[in-house]
Amino acid sequence: MATYIVLLGGPGAGKGTQAKMLAQELGIPQVSTGDLFREHLSGNTELGKLAKGYMDRGELVPDQVTVDMVRERFDRPDCANGALLDGFPRTVGQAQGLAELLEEKGAELAVVPYINADSEVLLRRLAGRWTCRQCGAMYHAIFGPSRKAGVCDQCGGELYQREDDTPETQRRRMEVYSEQTAPLIEWYWSKGLLVEIDGEQTIEQVRDELLAAVRDRLSAGLERSVAG
Ligand code: ADP
Ligand code: ADP
Ligand code: ZN
Protein backbone atom coordinates (compact mmCIF):
# COMPACT_ATOMS: atom_id res chain seq x y z
CA MET A 1 0.00 0.00 0.00
CA ALA A 2 1.26 3.44 -0.91
CA THR A 3 1.62 5.89 1.98
CA TYR A 4 0.20 9.39 1.62
CA ILE A 5 0.66 11.92 4.39
CA VAL A 6 -0.37 15.59 4.58
CA LEU A 7 1.63 17.94 6.82
CA LEU A 8 -0.50 20.81 8.10
CA GLY A 9 0.71 23.96 9.84
CA GLY A 10 0.90 27.72 9.42
CA PRO A 11 3.59 29.46 7.39
CA GLY A 12 6.85 28.99 9.29
CA ALA A 13 5.58 26.10 11.44
CA GLY A 14 8.45 23.93 10.22
CA LYS A 15 6.68 21.84 7.56
CA GLY A 16 9.51 22.05 5.06
CA THR A 17 12.17 21.41 7.69
CA GLN A 18 10.37 18.36 9.05
CA ALA A 19 9.13 17.05 5.70
CA LYS A 20 12.70 16.61 4.45
CA MET A 21 13.62 14.45 7.45
CA LEU A 22 10.36 12.52 7.58
CA ALA A 23 10.30 11.76 3.85
CA GLN A 24 13.79 10.34 4.11
CA GLU A 25 12.84 8.19 7.12
CA LEU A 26 9.76 6.82 5.34
CA GLY A 27 11.33 6.42 1.91
CA ILE A 28 8.69 8.50 0.11
CA PRO A 29 9.25 11.80 -1.73
CA GLN A 30 8.45 15.19 -0.23
CA VAL A 31 5.98 16.98 -2.47
CA SER A 32 5.96 20.69 -1.68
CA THR A 33 3.69 22.86 -3.83
CA GLY A 34 5.68 25.92 -2.74
CA ASP A 35 8.87 24.30 -4.07
CA LEU A 36 7.10 23.21 -7.27
CA PHE A 37 5.85 26.76 -7.89
CA ARG A 38 9.35 28.12 -7.23
CA GLU A 39 10.77 25.65 -9.78
CA HIS A 40 8.27 26.92 -12.34
CA LEU A 41 9.19 30.49 -11.41
CA SER A 42 12.90 29.97 -12.00
CA GLY A 43 12.20 27.98 -15.18
CA ASN A 44 10.03 30.92 -16.34
CA THR A 45 7.23 28.56 -17.46
CA GLU A 46 3.66 29.71 -18.16
CA LEU A 47 2.59 28.26 -14.82
CA GLY A 48 5.47 30.09 -13.13
CA LYS A 49 4.38 33.40 -14.67
CA LEU A 50 0.83 32.83 -13.50
CA ALA A 51 1.87 31.84 -9.97
CA LYS A 52 4.31 34.73 -9.45
CA GLY A 53 1.69 37.42 -8.88
CA TYR A 54 -0.10 35.37 -6.24
CA MET A 55 3.14 34.39 -4.51
CA ASP A 56 4.45 37.97 -4.41
CA ARG A 57 1.23 39.06 -2.71
CA GLY A 58 1.15 36.12 -0.30
CA GLU A 59 -2.12 34.92 -1.84
CA LEU A 60 -2.97 31.40 -2.94
CA VAL A 61 -2.60 30.24 -6.52
CA PRO A 62 -6.07 29.08 -7.75
CA ASP A 63 -7.13 25.58 -6.68
CA GLN A 64 -7.54 24.04 -10.13
CA VAL A 65 -4.03 25.03 -11.25
CA THR A 66 -2.55 23.75 -7.99
CA VAL A 67 -4.38 20.43 -8.02
CA ASP A 68 -3.41 19.85 -11.68
CA MET A 69 0.24 20.47 -10.79
CA VAL A 70 0.03 17.92 -7.96
CA ARG A 71 -1.65 15.39 -10.27
CA GLU A 72 1.28 15.71 -12.66
CA ARG A 73 3.76 15.36 -9.80
CA PHE A 74 2.02 12.18 -8.59
CA ASP A 75 2.49 10.65 -12.03
CA ARG A 76 6.27 10.74 -11.74
CA PRO A 77 7.70 7.31 -10.90
CA ASP A 78 9.14 8.29 -7.51
CA CYS A 79 5.58 8.71 -6.19
CA ALA A 80 4.75 5.03 -6.78
CA ASN A 81 4.91 4.33 -3.03
CA GLY A 82 3.14 7.49 -1.95
CA ALA A 83 4.17 11.01 -0.99
CA LEU A 84 4.62 13.37 1.91
CA LEU A 85 2.63 16.49 1.06
CA ASP A 86 3.95 19.75 2.46
CA GLY A 87 1.96 22.96 1.89
CA PHE A 88 -0.84 21.15 0.06
CA PRO A 89 -3.82 21.11 0.42
CA ARG A 90 -4.31 24.69 1.57
CA THR A 91 -8.06 25.04 0.96
CA VAL A 92 -11.08 22.79 1.34
CA GLY A 93 -11.36 22.78 -2.47
CA GLN A 94 -7.80 21.42 -2.73
CA ALA A 95 -8.53 18.83 -0.04
CA GLN A 96 -11.46 17.63 -2.15
CA GLY A 97 -9.21 17.61 -5.22
CA LEU A 98 -6.66 15.52 -3.33
CA ALA A 99 -9.34 13.09 -2.16
CA GLU A 100 -10.32 12.56 -5.82
CA LEU A 101 -6.71 12.09 -6.93
CA LEU A 102 -6.19 9.45 -4.25
CA GLU A 103 -9.47 7.73 -5.02
CA GLU A 104 -8.38 7.35 -8.66
CA LYS A 105 -5.31 5.55 -7.34
CA GLY A 106 -7.28 3.42 -4.90
CA ALA A 107 -5.24 5.04 -2.12
CA GLU A 108 -6.11 7.04 0.96
CA LEU A 109 -4.43 9.34 3.45
CA ALA A 110 -2.67 7.58 6.31
CA VAL A 111 -2.41 10.48 8.75
CA VAL A 112 -2.40 14.28 8.87
CA PRO A 113 0.11 15.65 11.40
CA TYR A 114 -0.68 19.24 12.34
CA ILE A 115 2.37 21.17 13.53
CA ASN A 116 0.90 23.74 15.87
CA ALA A 117 2.68 26.98 16.82
CA ASP A 118 1.51 30.41 17.92
CA SER A 119 1.39 33.16 15.27
CA GLU A 120 4.06 35.19 17.12
CA VAL A 121 6.39 32.20 16.87
CA LEU A 122 5.56 31.74 13.19
CA LEU A 123 6.38 35.35 12.34
CA ARG A 124 9.74 35.16 14.16
CA ARG A 125 10.60 32.02 12.22
CA LEU A 126 9.68 33.47 8.83
CA ALA A 127 11.67 36.63 9.52
CA GLY A 128 14.90 34.66 10.05
CA ARG A 129 14.45 31.99 7.39
CA TRP A 130 17.35 31.32 5.02
CA THR A 131 17.20 28.64 2.31
CA CYS A 132 19.92 26.95 0.28
CA ARG A 133 19.61 27.80 -3.40
CA GLN A 134 21.18 24.48 -4.35
CA CYS A 135 19.70 21.77 -2.09
CA GLY A 136 16.79 23.54 -0.37
CA ALA A 137 18.12 23.00 3.16
CA MET A 138 16.59 25.41 5.67
CA TYR A 139 18.38 27.58 8.22
CA HIS A 140 17.36 30.20 10.73
CA ALA A 141 19.41 33.30 11.54
CA ILE A 142 18.87 32.77 15.28
CA PHE A 143 17.31 29.33 15.89
CA GLY A 144 19.50 27.31 13.53
CA PRO A 145 22.25 29.25 11.72
CA SER A 146 24.65 27.64 9.24
CA ARG A 147 28.23 27.21 10.45
CA LYS A 148 29.52 29.74 7.92
CA ALA A 149 27.29 32.77 7.23
CA GLY A 150 25.55 32.55 3.86
CA VAL A 151 26.89 29.07 3.03
CA CYS A 152 24.99 25.75 3.25
CA ASP A 153 26.47 23.23 5.73
CA GLN A 154 25.28 20.34 3.62
CA CYS A 155 26.33 21.23 0.09
CA GLY A 156 28.26 24.51 0.20
CA GLY A 157 25.49 26.23 -1.79
CA GLU A 158 24.54 29.89 -1.40
CA LEU A 159 21.87 30.77 1.19
CA TYR A 160 19.18 33.29 0.30
CA GLN A 161 16.11 34.88 1.87
CA ARG A 162 12.93 34.27 -0.10
CA GLU A 163 11.54 37.25 -1.95
CA ASP A 164 8.12 36.57 -0.45
CA ASP A 165 9.50 36.63 3.10
CA THR A 166 8.99 40.39 3.43
CA PRO A 167 7.07 41.57 6.54
CA GLU A 168 4.09 42.59 4.41
CA THR A 169 3.77 39.27 2.55
CA GLN A 170 4.33 37.36 5.78
CA ARG A 171 1.37 39.11 7.39
CA ARG A 172 -0.82 38.43 4.36
CA ARG A 173 0.23 34.75 4.30
CA MET A 174 -0.78 34.47 7.95
CA GLU A 175 -4.22 35.96 7.21
CA VAL A 176 -4.72 33.73 4.21
CA TYR A 177 -3.71 30.77 6.36
CA SER A 178 -6.28 31.48 9.07
CA GLU A 179 -9.05 32.20 6.56
CA GLN A 180 -8.50 29.46 4.00
CA THR A 181 -6.19 26.78 5.40
CA ALA A 182 -6.99 26.58 9.12
CA PRO A 183 -10.48 25.12 8.36
CA LEU A 184 -8.62 21.99 7.18
CA ILE A 185 -7.66 21.24 10.79
CA GLU A 186 -11.33 20.64 11.60
CA TRP A 187 -11.89 18.92 8.23
CA TYR A 188 -9.21 16.28 8.81
CA TRP A 189 -10.00 16.01 12.50
CA SER A 190 -13.58 15.04 11.65
CA LYS A 191 -12.18 12.30 9.40
CA GLY A 192 -10.12 10.92 12.30
CA LEU A 193 -6.83 11.67 10.52
CA LEU A 194 -5.47 14.61 12.51
CA VAL A 195 -2.62 14.27 15.01
CA GLU A 196 -1.50 17.46 16.72
CA ILE A 197 2.23 17.99 17.21
CA ASP A 198 3.63 20.71 19.49
CA GLY A 199 5.55 22.85 17.00
CA GLU A 200 7.06 25.17 19.62
CA GLN A 201 9.73 22.65 20.62
CA THR A 202 13.21 22.40 19.13
CA ILE A 203 13.54 21.00 15.60
CA GLU A 204 14.79 17.67 17.04
CA GLN A 205 11.94 17.40 19.56
CA VAL A 206 9.34 18.13 16.87
CA ARG A 207 10.98 15.53 14.64
CA ASP A 208 10.86 12.85 17.35
CA GLU A 209 7.23 13.54 18.26
CA LEU A 210 6.25 13.63 14.59
CA LEU A 211 8.04 10.43 13.69
CA ALA A 212 6.58 8.57 16.68
CA ALA A 213 3.04 9.74 15.84
CA VAL A 214 3.36 8.78 12.18
CA ARG A 215 4.90 5.36 12.93
CA ASP A 216 2.11 4.72 15.42
CA ARG A 217 -0.60 5.50 12.87
CA LEU A 218 1.07 3.56 10.08
CA SER A 219 1.41 0.40 12.18
CA ALA A 220 -2.20 0.73 13.42
CA GLY A 221 -3.30 1.01 9.77
CA LEU A 222 -1.26 -2.07 8.89
CA GLU A 223 -2.85 -4.09 11.69
CA ARG A 224 -6.30 -3.08 10.49
CA SER A 225 -5.56 -4.12 6.92
CA VAL A 226 -4.11 -7.47 8.07
CA ALA A 227 -7.08 -8.09 10.36
CA GLY A 228 -9.57 -7.00 7.68
P1 ADP B 1 5.59 28.79 3.43
O1 ADP B 1 6.75 27.82 3.54
O2 ADP B 1 5.96 30.16 3.88
O3 ADP B 1 4.35 28.27 4.08
P2 ADP B 1 5.28 27.93 0.65
O4 ADP B 1 6.67 27.81 0.17
O5 ADP B 1 4.57 26.71 1.03
O6 ADP B 1 5.26 28.97 1.87
O7 ADP B 1 4.41 28.70 -0.42
C1 ADP B 1 4.81 29.93 -1.01
C2 ADP B 1 3.69 30.49 -1.88
O8 ADP B 1 3.39 29.56 -2.94
C3 ADP B 1 2.36 30.69 -1.17
O9 ADP B 1 2.30 31.95 -0.51
C4 ADP B 1 1.38 30.60 -2.34
O10 ADP B 1 1.37 31.78 -3.10
C5 ADP B 1 2.00 29.51 -3.21
N1 ADP B 1 1.48 28.18 -2.82
C6 ADP B 1 2.19 27.15 -2.27
N2 ADP B 1 1.41 26.08 -2.06
C7 ADP B 1 0.16 26.43 -2.47
C8 ADP B 1 -1.10 25.77 -2.51
N3 ADP B 1 -1.26 24.51 -2.05
N4 ADP B 1 -2.16 26.44 -2.99
C9 ADP B 1 -2.04 27.70 -3.48
N5 ADP B 1 -0.90 28.38 -3.46
C10 ADP B 1 0.21 27.76 -2.97
P1 ADP C 1 7.21 26.03 6.73
O1 ADP C 1 7.63 25.09 5.63
O2 ADP C 1 6.15 25.44 7.60
O3 ADP C 1 6.83 27.37 6.21
P2 ADP C 1 10.04 26.06 7.45
O4 ADP C 1 10.37 24.62 7.56
O5 ADP C 1 10.43 26.78 6.22
O6 ADP C 1 8.46 26.26 7.70
O7 ADP C 1 10.64 26.80 8.73
C1 ADP C 1 10.60 28.22 8.87
C2 ADP C 1 11.86 28.72 9.57
O8 ADP C 1 11.84 28.32 10.94
C3 ADP C 1 13.17 28.18 9.00
O9 ADP C 1 14.12 29.21 9.07
C4 ADP C 1 13.55 27.02 9.93
O10 ADP C 1 14.95 26.87 10.02
C5 ADP C 1 12.97 27.50 11.26
N1 ADP C 1 12.45 26.41 12.11
C6 ADP C 1 11.75 25.30 11.72
N2 ADP C 1 11.40 24.54 12.77
C7 ADP C 1 11.87 25.18 13.88
C8 ADP C 1 11.83 24.88 15.30
N3 ADP C 1 11.21 23.80 15.80
N4 ADP C 1 12.42 25.77 16.13
C9 ADP C 1 13.04 26.88 15.65
N5 ADP C 1 13.12 27.21 14.34
C10 ADP C 1 12.54 26.37 13.46
ZN1 ZN D 1 22.61 23.15 0.35
Image (cartoon, grey):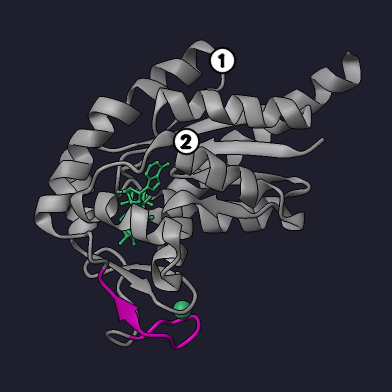
Q: Which residue is label 2 attached to?
A: 64
Q: Secondary structure at mark 1?
A: loop
Q: CA distance from mark 1 to mark 2?
A: 26 Å
Total labels: the figure holds 2
- 82 in relation to 20, above or below: above
Q: Count residues near mark 2 (Cα–Cα under 10 Å), then give few for <14, some for 14-19, many for 20+.
A: few
The image quadrant of residue 187 is top left
Query: Ligand 2: which quarter?
Result: bottom left
Q: Hey, which residue is sitting farthest front in the picture?
A: 46
The residue pinned by badge 1 equals 192
Quarter of image, res 92 = top left
Q: Which residues are magenta?
A: 151-161
Disc 1 marks which amino acid? Gly
Q: Amino acid at mark 2?
A: Gln
As displayed, is residue 109 above or below residue 143? above
Q: Nearer the viewer's eye, disc 1 or disc 2?
A: 2
**Majority secondary structure of magenta residues:** loop
Residue 204, visible in the rendered structure: no
- The residue that appears at 63% across and 25% down in the rendered structure is 100
Above-or-below relation of 33 to 155: above
Q: Nearer the viewer, residue 57 or 173?
A: 57
Residue 20: x and y, percent? 53, 58
